[in-house]
Image (cartoon, grey):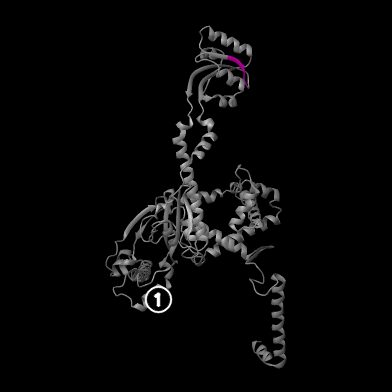
Amino acid sequence: MLTFFRSFMTSKVGLFVALAFLGLIALAFAAGDISSSGQFGGVAGGDRVATVGSRKISTAELSQGATNALDQVKQENPGLTMKQFVAAGGLTDALEQLIDRAAISVFGAEHGITASNRLIDSEIAQISAFNGPDGKFSQTAYQALLQQRGLSEAAVRQDIADSLVARQVLVPAAFGARMPKGLVSRYAALLTERRAGSIALLPSAAFVPKDEPDAAALAAFYTAHRADYTRPERRVVRYALFDDTAIRNVPAPTEAEIAARYSADKARYAPSENRTITQLILPTEAAAKAVLAEVTAGKSLAAAAGAKGLTTATLGPIARPALAAQTNEAVAAAAFSATPQKMAGPVRAAVGWALLRVDAIEQKPGKTLGQARGEITAAIAADKQHAALVEFSAKVEDEFDNGSSLGDVAKELGLTLQQTDPLTADGKVYGKDAPAPAELARVLATAFSMEREGQPQLAEIEAGKQFIVFDVSQITPSAAAPITEIRPQVMADLMLQKGSAAAKAAAEKVQAQAKKNSDLAAAMTALRVAGLPPVDRLEISRQQFA
């Protein structure tokens, strides 16, 4: 049959049929591409990486899923790059997770298990990240966070819908699941099983060859294991700190400014009086008068209140306006017209009738302009210094925006630039067990997000009080260390690998001898390798082993 087809394809008729068939194939591919994506190319003729039933997983979903997975892994390994993540199989894992979620969602849809829009809305409203300042769901915060993360609302709703369907499908499936009693009994019985035998260990180090490999073998090993010698990205940060002491020639407060501040804070410098008051609230005026009579007769207010199942309350020290706001004007007027240790009332309170006793009076004399001049002058001077610092920081940002370098601005300010050792993204000095300078804690993430060297920025260390100007003076990308710098380490790893291979071969030889009913200790001795640990005898139950 094969000979027939070969001879047919070499004939004129066969050649014509073959060309026509190839044309049909090309036309089919083109038509499929155009109908799927409107243009030639793409993955499987469209923007998709997998299809689960009628559900298509797009390249955008895979890209977002891989990015999210990388961000999670970076919390434990900040120096990990996307290239390393993909090489370690992270992209495949992300795709499998997307396929699993889509499969559960499609299964649910086929069996009438779905998530309605109202249910999705309720789930979104419960996510605290979308809450506004009042603690309730904010559409503005919701849209802002989606924009910040580069997510579309449709993608977020689909993700929540998949989670809701998965919850409805998987939780009932797992509820009440039980293992058969016979299987449980046999599994439990395994824990009492005891075994006796011998264990022989063959360390790789004992089989390391004595002769070192040549340069070609070393280079080949380094090339094959380059990823094992990858160093994290390092950055050198230049920075300088400054506060209001960097601002000079701030004008002193004028007499007009001092007078205006005194006038604005007139209530603060006016004489004031605070009183400490004991208050008892009774339900009726008659009851209040009865208690007042008992107190007038010599009974204490606390005792009279206790006899009726009531308790007194202590207010203050409190000023009259504050007391009026807390109770009402009538109560405040009565309290501030009474003499110390005397009763006042009964007075109509917000709830019931009040009896009042003034326990103490604190009178604070006011201050004249002359008396308050010192503290007002200091306050205005501090405000001016702070305003000058904020204005100065804005000027620095303008200079950076206009192309000034960090060195230029530091020279203009009279600041001394400091430079760190190479730092890693986790906030440590590369090659040393030491943290980055504490003052860089708030700006280190920004420094590692800069695309290139020499992009100066300004940031606040302490709001309104201390600022930092900084840039990245050197970026060393993540890459494998040159073999010339780590030759001893590469050599040791290669020798250990050779020793491991030799140890495996020796172990297989000992295993073969043991299968022939040879004594394990004798088989180990026959290897004639120095430094091997002795054979151990072991008798132990499975439970003890676990």
Residue 50 visible (yes or no): yes
Seen in the picture, residue 158 relative to 48 is either above or below; the reply is above
Would residue 426 appear left or right of 61 to someone viewing this image? Answer: left
Percent from the top left, x then y, of residue 294?
Answer: 55, 8
Seen in the picture, residue 489 relative to 467 is either above or below; the reply is below
Q: What residue occupies the far front of the structure in this picture? A: 255
Residue range in magenta is 345-349
- Check residue 161 for magenta coloring: no
Percent from the top left, x then y, of residue 416?
Answer: 38, 57
Residue shown at the point (34%, 56%) measured from the top left: 538
Identify which residue, 450 or 527, lies in the foreground: 450
Residue shown at the point (72%, 75%) measured from the top left: 31
Residue 116 visible (yes or no): no
Would residue 31 appear left or right of 491 to someone viewing this image? Answer: right
Identify which residue, 179 or 79, lies in the foreground: 79
Seen in the picture, residue 262 relative to 121 is either above or below; the reply is above
Q: Main secondary structure of the magenta part?
A: strand
Instruction: Give the residue type at disc 1.
Output: Ala
Identify which residue, 243 or 480, lies in the foreground: 243
* Number of numbered discs on residues: 1
Residue indicated by mark 1:
220
Percent from the top left, x then y, of residue 216?
Answer: 37, 78
Q: Secondary structure at mark 1?
A: helix
